[in-house]
């Protein structure tokens, strides 16, 4: 399975409009998002890229692990982060998704969370990799998202 790590930020007159702009920036705005927990199936390959929506998938279901943070206070920043680790041999692994107002806190929480999750399993995971994005509020609501996109399905599949 190919899993795409994509991220985006947005700004708008309302938090929902900012969220929509962030989804547009990440390339996933025209889907119905279905949130997953944080397990990576065996034989998965993860790559980082802006997700490109095929034109015939408008309105499809899209399975994602998503970190999202909204901010409305001028001067504050919305940060979202996703991190993962995989077994080299099998490709199976773990995701975490976190958010906050400080990049350093999101990064620290990502590492702490995954290290704890790894320690509680008897599997040989590889290095922790992560993606973090953020946007500062200047007076209009902002949103930051990081998504691990698993797959899409039409409604007749």
Image (tube, rainbow, N blue to C red):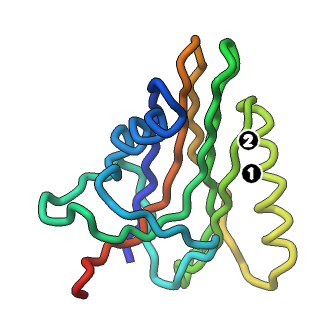
Q: Residues within 10 Å of mark 2 (few under 14, many from 20)?
A: many
16 up-or-down from 39: above or below: above
The quarter of the rendered structure image containing the C terminus is bottom left
Q: Is residue 2 left or right of 139 when viewed as pictured?
A: left
- The residue carrying mark 1 is 110
Q: Residue at x 62, y 76 (%)?
A: 39
Q: Is residue 129 left or right of 52 when viewed as pictured?
A: right
Q: Are marks 1 and 2 in contact (CB under 8 Å)?
A: yes
Task: Name the outermost residue toward the left.
Answer: 56
Q: Quadrant of residue 108?
A: top right
How many numbered badges does the structure rendering display? Answer: 2
Give residue 83's position: percent from left, percent from top.
63, 55
Classify mark 1: helix, strand or loop: helix
Give residue 95's position: percent from left, percent from top.
63, 65
Q: Quadrant of residue 31?
A: bottom left
63 up-or-down from 5: above or below: below
28 up-or-down from 61: above or below: above
Q: Quadrant of residue 155?
A: bottom left
Give residue 93's position: percent from left, percent from top.
62, 75
Instruction: Kindly identify which numbered label has been placed on residue 107.
Output: 2
Q: Residue at x 74, y 83 (%)?
A: 123
The quarter of the rendered structure image containing the N terminus is bottom left
Q: Residues within 10 Å of mark 1 (few under 14, many from 20)?
A: many
87 up-or-down from 102: above or below: below
Q: Residue at x 84, y 54 (%)?
A: 112
Give residue 110's position: percent from left, percent from top.
74, 51
Q: Residue at x 53, y 18 (%)?
A: 140
Q: Nearer the viewer, residue 15 or 2?
A: 15
Instruction: Kindly identify which numbered label has been placed on residue 125.
Output: none
Measured Cα–Cα span from mark 1 to mark 2: 5 Å
Classify mark 2: helix, strand or loop: helix
């Amino acid at each position: 399975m190919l899993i795409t790590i994509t991220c985006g930020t947005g700004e708008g007159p309302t938090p929902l409009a900012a969220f929509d702009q962030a989804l547009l920036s990440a390339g996933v705005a025209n889907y119905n998002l279905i949130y997953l927990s944080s397990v990576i199936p065996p034989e998965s390959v993860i790559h980082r890229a802006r997700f490109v929506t095929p034109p015939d998938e408008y309105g499809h279901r899209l399975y994602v692990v998503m970190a999202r943070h909204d901010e409305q206070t001028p001067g504050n920043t919305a940060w979202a982060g996703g991190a993962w680790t995989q077994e080299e041999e099998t490709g199976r692994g773990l995701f975490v998704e976190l958010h906050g107002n400080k990049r350093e806190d999101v990064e620290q929480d990502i590492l702490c969370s995954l290290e704890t999750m790894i320690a509680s399993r008897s599997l040989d995971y590889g290095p922790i990799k992560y993606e973090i994005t953020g946007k500062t509020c200047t007076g209009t609501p902002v949103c930051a998202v990081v998504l691990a996109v698993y797959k899409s399905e039409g409604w007749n599949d």
